Amino acid sequence: MVEVEILNHERGEVVGTIDMDGNLDTESEALRNVSQEYLEEGVPVLFPTTYENEEGETVHADAEVMVEPGTRGFVRAFVDELPSPFDCDSEALADLPLYDTERD
């Protein structure tokens, strides 16, 4: 189970935790408010993709996918989208799995 602590850098304290199933444990109303949409609808993530256009040329573009709670990479996507002052420890962030487009 992937779970990380969410920090408020202005206060210098842990204000909650989030796990890969979207279970947010916090008493911070501000964190709850900025998180609600991501918990209900998922987190938009851009990833590079290629496709062939009508002329047969290879096109490189970014595609968007919604990473929903319970999906590999949700916690990383969630933390990446949090506005300042919310974040998680950089070491914890480095260890979080990314969304895997190959598994979608």
Image: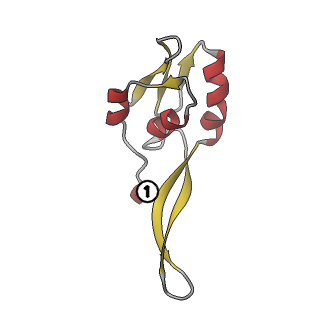
List the single residue furthest toward the front: 10
Q: Is residue 61 above or below residue 104?
A: below
Please indicate whether residue 74 sits to the left or right of residue 34 in the image. Answer: left
Foreground pick, 26 / 15: 15
The percent coordinates of residue 60 (x first, y second) are: 47, 70
Foreground pick, 12 / 64: 12
The percent coordinates of residue 8 (x first, y second) are: 51, 17
The percent coordinates of residue 104 (x first, y second) are: 46, 56
Please indicate whether residue 98 sits to the left or right of residue 39 in the image. Answer: left
Q: Residue at x 52, y 61 (%)?
A: 62
What is the crowding at mark 1: few (fewer than 14 residues within 10 Å), some, or many (at least 20)? few
Colour scheme in use: secondary structure
* Residue position for label 1: 101
Quarter occupied by the N terminus: top left
Amino acid type at circle 1 is: Thr
Name which quarter of the figure residue 64 lies in: bottom right
Q: How many marks?
A: 1
Q: Is residue 25 above or below residue 77?
A: above
The percent coordinates of residue 40 (x first, y second) are: 65, 37
Q: Residue at x 64, y 42 (%)?
A: 41
Q: Residue at x 54, y 88 (%)?
A: 55
Callout 1: SS: helix
